[in-house]
Each structure stands twice: as C-alpha cells, then as structure tokens.
Image (spheres, helix red, strand yellow):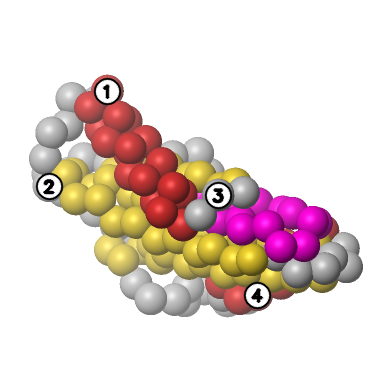
Amino acid sequence: MKKYTITKGCGNSKYAICAFDNALLASGIADYNLIKLSSILPAGCSRVDTVDLPKGSFLHTAFSKYIENRPGITISAAIAIAIPKDKTMPGVIMESSGSYNEKVAVELVASMVEIAMEARGITEFEIIKESITMKTKDGFNCAIAAVSIW
C-alpha cells in the first residue's frame, strides 16, 4: 500500500443505511467495497486527492461515522493521522464521532494520535486532521470522516 486519501461527507435519508451511503457518496468513496481498518498508516504512503482504483474495488479504510435521527442536533466526525518524521516508521490513525461540535471532534482525535505516538516512543511527528459537522434534519443523518489506503 503506497497511497492514501482523507475524505469526509454528510448524508441524509429516511433510512439509516441510505444516510450512510449518501455520506459515502459525498465523501467520494461510496462505489468501493470498504474494508474496515484499525489505526495504522503504512510507512512510505503518499497522500493523494482521490482514489484511483476501478469502482467496485476493495478499499482499505479507517473511518468514523455518526448516525442521528433527531432533528436539530449537531453531529461531527473527525479523523487524524500522526505521521512520524522518520518516513520508515508507520503512522497512526484515530477516529472520533458523536453529537458534539467540530472543535471537540478535532481536539479528541488530535489528543488520541498524540497519546498513540507517545505510547510508541515517537516524539517527532506531523498531525493531519480532517473533520465535518452538520446540523441534523428530519430523517436519518450521517457524518463520516475517513482515511482510505491502497
């Protein structure tokens, strides 16, 4: 695996799974078979803007999602990657989602990757953060933030 992209999106529908699918459509990764990852970015990966695999391909993805069906609620999803300055070492990915604002979501994932790097004894690293927030409407609402790796 040599490439990764960070995406995010929101979706709404009368069904929870369709709200999730609409969030995936908004994020640009709906037409792939997502394989859920835990929390490691392989060493030497390069960030790109979009997935360049044929639609229908398997796509390894770490993601956070939050689905809510009460209108007027603020929901967020966030993801952070800590990338060591030593490019031979893997990075760490952390996700967070919930009924809180974007500032809280970003602070949570940033803190999580810092703790993960400290546990690994890595002191020099860059943190990349992405998040999305929405105010829910009628029906089901979904916020997703993801890192896809291939």
| Secondary structure of residue under mark 4 | helix
| Secondary structure of residue under mark 1 | helix
Residue in the picture at 60% in, 66% down: 134
- Can you tell which quarter of the image residue 120 is in? top left
- Separation of residues labelled 1 and 2 (CA atoms): 16 Å
Q: Identify residue for label 2.
A: 85
Q: Identify residue for label 4.
A: 25
Q: Identify residue for label 1.
A: 119
Comparing marks 1 and 2, which lies closer to the viewer? 1
Q: Residue furthest front?
A: 72
Q: Mark 1 Cα within 10 Å, few/some/many (few <14, many 20+)? A: few
Comparing marks 3 and 1, which lies closer to the viewer? 3
Lower sequence index among marks 1 and 2: 2
Identify the mark at residue 135; answer none if there is no mark: none
- Can you tell which quarter of the image residue 40 is in? top left
Q: Identify residue for label 3.
A: 100
Lower sequence index among marks 4 and 3: 4
Comparing marks 4 and 3, which lies closer to the viewer? 3
Mark 2 vs 3: CB contact within 8 A: no
Lower sequence index among marks 2 and 4: 4
